Amino acid sequence: MRSNRLNVQFRYYERNFVRPLQTSYGSWAKREGIVVRLRDEANRFGWGEIAPLPWFGTETLEQAIAFLRSLDGEISPAQLWQIPDTLPCCQFALESAFKSLANDREPTPFTLPPDRLAALLPAGERVLSSWQNPWTAGHRTFKWKIGVFTSELEWGWFAQLLGNLPPEGRLRLDANGALTEAACRGWLERCDGAGDRVEFLEQPLAQVAPMQAIAPHFRTPIALDESVTQFKHLQAAVQGGWRGLFVLKPSIAGFPSRLQATIQTRGLDCVFSSVFESFVGQGAALRLAEVGARPGGARALGFGVGSWLDPLPPRWLAGLWNRRS
Ligand SMILES: O=C(O)CCC(=O)c1ccccc1C(=O)O
Ligand SMILES: [Mg+2]
């Protein structure tokens, strides 16, 4: 190996959803991703994960694989920092792997205390019978996908849900950009009417400008998600004076160091969130959440998605390396 070069290996994986995730984009049945392993000249290893979300504007799995193949088994640190913004998941995976060389320890599965995690609930009426198990497990923040059925139907279920959920339970509503402006106002009126039970309404509309116009008229904050997935869009929203929340999904947000710098210099009010990555990517995402947490109380983490995917077998990571790919 030439000086300062890192050996790069990668493995494809796939994982089925226990039940497909329904959002306003449609139905999602299988998470596919890639685990990357770097080895430096001191024979230390570092791991990272590429978990693309092309419908959020990231590279596709195929584009990530094409990039990794183009490296031909080696990358230098200088080359790593030159990964283009069109490959945000590759930026995230390779910087995480590079930083984790210092630990030289294979990532292992971990669990977080339920009271720190927002539990993801299914869309539609099923929400009414789906919050009880996570509640019993200790979750107090719940995220419900809306904009999947008509507003009238969803408003009915929302009222029932508020009636059933004990008062300490708080809700996040995620429309994935699917609402009309009228429906967005309708939701915000109902959220405001629910006192402090709705933490925020997430990405109700596709565009930032109308959300920015509507937000000041309501007490319930709006959180941007799709609108700030790409780093340049996050910068644009911050510079445009967005005063609400930011849902950040580190796995698809590019270089973690760059994201961290923006969070800290701008003092952003962030909610860190999953893209159904494995514990490899999740560990790196949570390291960012730790340093990105604002003094005086971080919001619940949007990583309460564990029960949505088939469990990983024991020694899953080692097993990936035992097979050829
Ligand atoms: O943010 C969370 O709490 C759970 C994660 C989540 O909802 C999500 C997961 C994958 C892709 C998109 C989204 C989303 O927030 O829209
Ligand atoms: Mg969202």
Image (cartoon, rainbow, N blue to C red):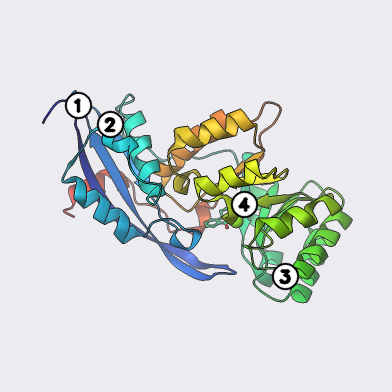
Secondary element at tag 2: helix
Q: Residue at 82% x, 50% y: name it.
A: 216
In the picture of the structure, the residue carrying the numbered disc 4 is 119
Instruction: Name the kind of residue labelled 2 in the image.
Output: Pro
Q: Residue at 20% x, 51% y: name it.
A: 69
Disc 2 Cβ-to-ligand 1 distance below 8 Å? no
Q: In this rendering, is residue 304 above or below 291? A: below
As drawn, the label of residue 4 is 1
Q: Give the crowd class for mark 3: few <14, some 14-19, many >=20 residues within 10 Å.
A: some
Q: Pointers 3 and 4 in contact (CB under 8 A)?
A: no
Q: CA distance from mark 1 to mark 2?
A: 7 Å
Q: In this rendering, is residue 78 above or below 54? A: above
Q: Residue at 46% x, 32% y: name it.
A: 257
Secondary element at tag 1: loop
Q: Residue at 63% x, 46% y: name it.
A: 237
Q: Is residue 154 left or right of residue 102?
A: right
Q: CA distance from mark 3 to mark 1?
A: 53 Å
Residue 172 in the image, given as x and y percentages of width and height: 70, 53
In the picture of the structure, the residue carrying the numbered disc 3 is 180
Q: Is residue 73 left or right of residue 307?
A: left
Residue 102 in the image, given as x and y percentages of width and height: 32, 24
Q: Is residue 52 left or right of residue 213?
A: left
Instruction: Name the kind of residue labelled 1 in the image.
Output: Asn
Q: Give the crowd class for mark 1: few <14, some 14-19, many >=20 residues within 10 Å.
A: few
Q: Comparing marks 4 and 1, which lies closer to the viewer?
A: 1
Precedes in sequence: disc 1 or disc 2 = 1
Residue 166 in the image, given as x and y percentages of width and height: 80, 52
Q: Pointers 1 and 2 in contact (CB under 8 A)?
A: yes
Q: CA distance from mark 3 to mark 4?
A: 26 Å
